[in-house]
Image (cartoon, grey):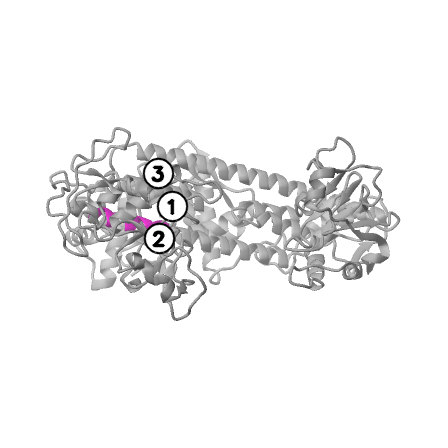
């Protein structure tokens, strides 16, 4: 496989990164247009090889009156009509200059327009295909046809090297380059026009491949979001789930869907389940909330409210829950209110005031809180915070909702933020769960008012119906939601780490590549063959692959590489035996069993007590699975039993390295030992018991009895549910302990 093909495949595998496609385009431009050590190239100033001139401005009133809607004439191209970096122009913008008016300059076909001023300077480029007039913020570049192909000029202007030179000449507050300064910039090009054509052909082929990759990635992301939506919709329509089921559901979901959009869907689905009584924490014997004993938490005043009529259009809730208007769940001494209308200038020693930009989804960002004059804040004491209030954005950046910590007592809020001060009938953090759930966020979206600046009025907000369970149930829901949201946040953090690792990998590969366009051969075909050879030539110094100079990434020495090779060997062995993808659950356990058989223990393996654990999240996001996928040793596929991993297009590259380390034999042992176990529970019981035994042995210095293992699991907050889920008894634990000793040795790993 050529370097370039390998690089494109790596970009495809890491195309979750938003800028992966553009990185590859820039890499190809920089590599092909680099004239270092190339014979037959010339470097001159732009003004020496092309005509360059700026366009003409038209007053908005004159443009509307004289040139808009004309049936004939040359299109007038303003900066907004240049579509960006790729070169297309909008010729059908409705503005035309009659051909008999000579005061406007014309850009002919084959010229290149470049934005010279403002935020788009050097970034917006247009390739002209017909006569056009153009604005004064654009430069027209007409290359000398004996020296330069117009398409070559466009590609050169797109390169990072040219962009850096361009911006070194930018001056002024608005940010622009003078015509004289632009003409002084240099361009490098092959003297032979046929070599320019060859370079353009190479760039075009890569750009076409990247366009296909980009389209397929976008479609795949779209389908993944649609699939995750359907998956979660089916879950939210099922019967209630308990806490352990929710945790298992989380692990199963993120095995397939771990993009930011899908994780947000997962979090929102759980919030809606929680605040409609479907996370299995409700006790039907607990009495429903009533107005008896209800009081203002600030003044102690007794409160009353009339019961709400049944909501036929609302989701079903347990019988001991009530629908109550939000306005009836607040302290009468502090009704729902918005804050300071005009904040004025910053006053460093003033009253810190929270704006909608500070109130995020379920937290307050304290990094840039504005302080305002005490005189400006004084009339708005009704919204001076005491701690424990719930804030919700009603204008500006919507979606923010958070509980005010006690440390922010004495702060105030801005007009675009509403303060909800809960009375004794509802916990602040339970109200946070409700207001941050899709149940209420949908209500917010449906009740926005205004045209230019949309917002939610307080009257509508106070009428929102809130599902209110007994207070004890509110506390249980808060704990369940907090745990689940934190779990999602940890996964999001791992995804960010994976993406950073991917970016670092791409950058390293780009810097490491030796891609160069060979000298032009006069059109006899040897150039393309030399190019292909330069892309695929082996690097003799590379001991890892022995094929190209794109060596596997190294992470923590050889540990992650060894893990990646083990992952690849196990996937290959299971696929060779059964022809089906190996799911992430079994792959995680298979690696665990292989390492235990090799003699590793939990003290030197990064396995955690996840719901379906032992589970090592780093394998997926930066370790063995991630590296094996990035090297195309394995890939994801859907089989008879769902999604999983199969050998990738480059799996052969890993076989010899795995054999040298004895990992192929280890993988075959796992297959022969565990392939007959069709039930995932059998895998989980053995791994769970083995892990617990090691943990107790490390802690107490002796092997535990089955009863001690049972007691240990029962008290464990992460694995307590496994006793019921796996139907664990002293007999089944004793059996698993005996099997683990037979497989892994009595003292291995300790």
Q: Residues within 10 Å of mark 3 (few under 14, many from 20)?
A: some
Q: Which residue is mark 2?
A: 597
N-terminal-most mark, 2 or 3: 3
**Which residue is painted at 25% across and 58% down in the image?**
695
The reply to whether discs 3 and 1 touch (Cβ–Cβ < 8 Å) is: no
Instruction: Tell me the tag on residue 397.
Output: none
Q: Quadrant of the C terminus?
A: bottom left
Main secondary-structure element of the magenta-colored stretch: helix
Instruction: Tell me the tag on residue 670.
Output: 1
Closer to the observer: label 3 or label 1? 3
Closer to the observer: label 2 or label 3? 3
Q: Which residue is mark 3?
A: 443
**Which residue is painted at 48% across and 56% down in the image?**
561
Magenta residues span 476-490
Query: Where's residue 708, x and y in %?
Result: 16, 54
- Secondary structure of the residue carrying tag 1 is helix
N-terminal-most mark, 3 or 1: 3
The span from disc 1 to disc 2 (Cα, nearest Å) is: 9 Å
The reply to whether discs 1 and 2 touch (Cβ–Cβ < 8 Å) is: yes
Q: Is residue 253 above or below residue 20?
A: above
- Secondary structure of the residue carrying tag 3 is helix
Q: Residues within 10 Å of mark 1 (few under 14, many from 20)?
A: many
């Amino acid at each position: 496989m050529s370097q370039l093909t390998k690089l494109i495949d790596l970009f495809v595998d890491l195309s979750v990164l938003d800028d992966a496609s553009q990185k590859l385009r820039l890499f190809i431009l920089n590599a092909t247009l680099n004239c270092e050590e190339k014979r037959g190239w010339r470097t001159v100033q732009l003004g020496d090889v092309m005509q360059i001139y700026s366009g003409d401005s038209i007053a908005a009133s004159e443009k509307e009156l004289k040139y808009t809607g004309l049936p004939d004439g040359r299109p007038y191209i303003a900066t907004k009509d240049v579509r960006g970096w790729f070169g297309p122009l909008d010729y059908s913008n409705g503005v035309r200059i009659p051909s008999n008016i000579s005061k406007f300059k014309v850009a002919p076909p084959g010229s290149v327009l470049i934005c010279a001023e403002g935020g788009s300077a050097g970034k917006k480029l247009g390739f002209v295909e017909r006569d056009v007039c153009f604005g004064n913020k654009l430069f027209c570049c007409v290359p000398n046809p004996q020296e330069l192909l117009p398409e070559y000029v466009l590609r050169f202007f797109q390169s990072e090297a040219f962009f850096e030179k361009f911006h070194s000449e930018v001056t002024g507050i608005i940010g622009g380059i003078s015509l004289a300064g632009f003409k002084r910039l240099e361009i490098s090009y092959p003297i032979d026009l046929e070599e320019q054509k060859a370079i353009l052909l190479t760039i075009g082929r890569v750009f076409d491949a990247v366009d296909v990759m980009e389209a397929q990635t976008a479609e795949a992301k779209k389908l993944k979001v649609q699939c995750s939506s359907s998956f979660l919709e089916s879950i939210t329509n099922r019967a209630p789930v308990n806490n352990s089921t929710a945790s298992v559901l989380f692990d199963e979901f993120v095995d397939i869907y771990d993009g930011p959009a899908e994780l947000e869907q997962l979090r929102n689905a759980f919030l809606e389940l929680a605040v409609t009584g479907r996370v299995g924490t409700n006790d039907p014997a607990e009495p429903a909330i009533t107005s008896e004993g209800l009081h203002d938490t600030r003044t102690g005043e007794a409160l009353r409210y009339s019961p709400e009529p049944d909501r036929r259009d609302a989701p079903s809730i347990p019988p001991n829950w009530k629908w109550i208007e939000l306005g009836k769940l607040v302290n009468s001494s502090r009704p729902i209110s918005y804050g300071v209308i005009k904040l004025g200038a910053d006053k460093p020693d003033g009253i810190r005031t929270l704006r909608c930009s500070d109130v995020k989804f379920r937290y307050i960002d304290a990094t840039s809180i504005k302080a305002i004059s005490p005189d400006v804040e004084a009339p708005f004491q009704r919204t001076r915070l005491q701690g424990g209030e719930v804030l919700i954005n009603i204008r500006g950046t919507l979606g923010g909702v958070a509980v005010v910590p006690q440390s922010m007592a004495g702060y105030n809020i801005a007009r675009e933020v509403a303060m909800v001060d809960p009375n004794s009938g509802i916990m602040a953090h339970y109200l946070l769960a409700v207001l941050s759930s899709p149940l209420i966020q949908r209500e917010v979206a449906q009740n926005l008012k205004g045209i230019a600046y949309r917002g939610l009025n307080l009257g509508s907000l106070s009428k929102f119906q809130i599902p209110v369970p007994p207070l004890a149930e509110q506390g249980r829901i808060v704990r369940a939601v907090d745990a689940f949201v934190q779990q999602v946040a940890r996964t999001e953090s791992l995804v960010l780490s994976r993406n950073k690792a991917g970016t670092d990998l791409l950058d390293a590969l780009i810097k490491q590549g030796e891609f160069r366009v060979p000298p032009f051969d006069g059109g006899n075909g040897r150039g393309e063959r030399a190019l292909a050879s330069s892309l695929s030539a082996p690097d003799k110094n590379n001991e890892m692959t022995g094929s190209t100079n794109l060596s596997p990434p190294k992470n923590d020495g050889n540990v992650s590489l060894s893990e990646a090779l083990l992952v690849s060997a196990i996937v290959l062995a299971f696929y060779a035996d059964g022809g089906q993808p190996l799911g992430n659950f079994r792959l995680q356990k298979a690696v665990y069993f292989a390492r235990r058989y090799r003699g590793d223990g939990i003290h030197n393996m990064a396995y955690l007590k996840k719901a379906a654990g032992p589970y090592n999240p780093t394998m997926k996001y930066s370790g063995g699975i991630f590296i094996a996928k990035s090297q195309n040793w394995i890939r994801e596929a859907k089989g008879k039993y769902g999604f999983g991993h199969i050998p990738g297009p480059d799996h052969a590259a890993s076989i010899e390295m795995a054999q040298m380390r004895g990992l192929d034999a280890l993988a075959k042992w796992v297959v022969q030992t565990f392939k007959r176990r069709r039930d995932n529970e059998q895998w989980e019981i053995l791994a769970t018991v083995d892990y617990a035994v090691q943990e107790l042995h490390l802690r107490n210095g002796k092997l535990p009895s089955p009863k001690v293992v049972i007691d240990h699991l029962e008290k464990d907050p992460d694995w307590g549910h496994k006793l019921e889920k796996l139907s664990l008894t002293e007999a089944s634990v004793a059996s698993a302990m005996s099997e683990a000793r037979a497989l892994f040795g009595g003292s291995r790993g300790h």
